[in-house]
Amino acid sequence: MPKIEIPYYPREVMVPFHERSERFACLVAHRRCGKTVAAINDLIRDALTIPRPDVRVAYIAPYYSQAKAIAWDYVLQFTAPIPGAVVNVAELRVDLPNGARIRLFGADNYNAMRGLYFDAVVLDEPADFPVNAWPTVIRPALSDRNGRATFIGTPKGKNEFWETYHHALNDDSWYVAMHKASQTKLLPQSELDEALKIMGADRYEQEFECSFEAAIAGAYYGHEMKAASDRIGIVPYNPSLGVVTAWDLGVGDSTAIWFAQFAGPNVHLIDYYECSGVGLDHYALVLQEKEYVYDQHILPHDVQVKELGTGKSRLETLDNLGIRPVTIAPQLRVDDGIQAVRSMLATCWFDEEKCDRGIEALRQYQRDFDEKGKTWRGRPKHDWTSHGADAMRYLAVGYRPQQTNWGEPIRRNLRGIA
């Protein structure tokens, strides 16, 4: 092909990204840093330079409408100087004269990519993708071409994007970079100061300083979990105290269990377990294998509902499995339960390693947002955080000290479960 000049002049902070040799890349960057423009031009370069006659590259946003709104104009702008480029607006696609193709997709319809192949992809804000989009469809599409993948985004708590970033930091085969507004100096300080006034410290830290620790907008327990940061560390099991479990029983999705010990005024969260797609016997075995001494198991009120297939309730099934004694959490309004958790969190200590996923669920559990009305709805957003947050809610409203006639806790264990 003849020499083609694209009207793109990379910002200094993006030059190492373009010069990388690693197959995978993770780019954490503040708002208006230029990460989308850099990623689009990186794809265009791949489309023009990979030595194959049928190169396929793709930009993928959480929603198809986002891909069109955010990236399509950039694709048109930077491919316009390429002689013979053919634009297909209906498919958000540009075909290049060397046989390569650039296309935009939305992860909301990730099955539209099933069966395709890619030489390079960009995943923009991958934490907002459906959980199966990357591992089951996009990643396999790279395999036969040894394709490259670039993850770009701005933090929204310790979610899947944080996991990718954390993995990249510890894997020499990844390119990884974080660009904070205070370091890049791309935006005037006066603009950043004004943004801080309007956005508040948490939003500003997240959007402009790339903080994965900042409280998320709309998070129910953001401030409480931030205040608890110095109470997250090593919290060992104390054999002299019984363990209280609190369950959120999933129907078709995850079941979450908190393991707590009440030590005077303090609540020690020593363990957390979450799983899906298994029967109740699996959880009974998990409790047995942990070898804790259990005081009580707090279950949601709907555990007493009888199932149509068996005519038995899950409470009866759990009792047959040795999960006892049981306390049924009272059926309170969700708002009342959330307030109970807020009050309890001030006394909570968390084991950082064993409770990692549960801690992140509490940090990121948030209100549902009405995009059209641009307001927070009066109910929680149902996502992966709901399971751990609901189990904690049942712990906060359901715990009642159980005592014998001598004032000592009743203790049970699950040894001997068949």
Image (cartoon, rainbow, N blue to C red):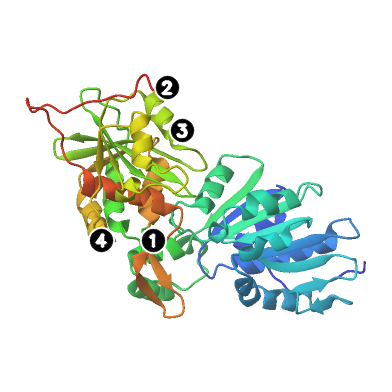
Q: Amino acid at mark 2?
A: Ala
Q: Which mark is residue 216?
A: 1
Q: Closer to the camera: disc 3 or disc 1?
A: 3
In the foreground, 187 or 213: 213
Instruction: Give the left or right position of residue 222, taking residue 12 as reference.
Output: left
Q: Label 2, on which residue? A: 418
Q: CA distance from mark 4 to mark 1?
A: 23 Å
> Counting other residues with Cα less than 10 Å from the Cα at mark 4, is it few (<14), some (14-19), or many (20 or more)?
few
Q: At 69% from the left edge and 60% from the top edge, which residue is drawn? A: 111
Residue 16 visible from this viewpoint? no
CA distance separating discs 3 and 2: 12 Å
Extreme-top residue of the structure: 416
Secondary structure under the numbered disc 3 in the rendered image: helix
Residue with the mark numbered 3? 282
In the figure, residue 77 lies in which quadrant?
bottom right
Q: Quadrant of residue 218?
A: bottom left
Q: Nearer the viewer, residue 90 or 94?
A: 90
Q: Amino acid at mark 3?
A: His
Circle 4 SS class:
loop
Write down the residue under mark 4.
333
* Residue type of the residue flagged with mark 1: Ile
Callout 4 touching callout 1 (CB < 8 Å)? no
* Location of residue 265 in the rendering, given as x and y in whole percent from the top left corner: 14, 40
Badge 2 crowding class, 10 Å Cα cut-off, few under 14, some 14 to 19, many 20 or more, is few
Residue 252: x and y in percent read 49, 50
Please, what is the three-letter code of the amino acid marked with disc 4? Arg
Q: Is residue 230 above or below residue 333?
A: above
Label located before the other in sequence (4 or 3):
3
On the rendered image, what quadrant is the N terminus found in? bottom right
Instruction: Using the numbered discs, state the Cα–Cα distance from disc 1 to disc 2 in whole angstroms.
Output: 44 Å
Element type at mark 1:
loop
Q: CA distance from mark 4 to mark 2?
A: 37 Å
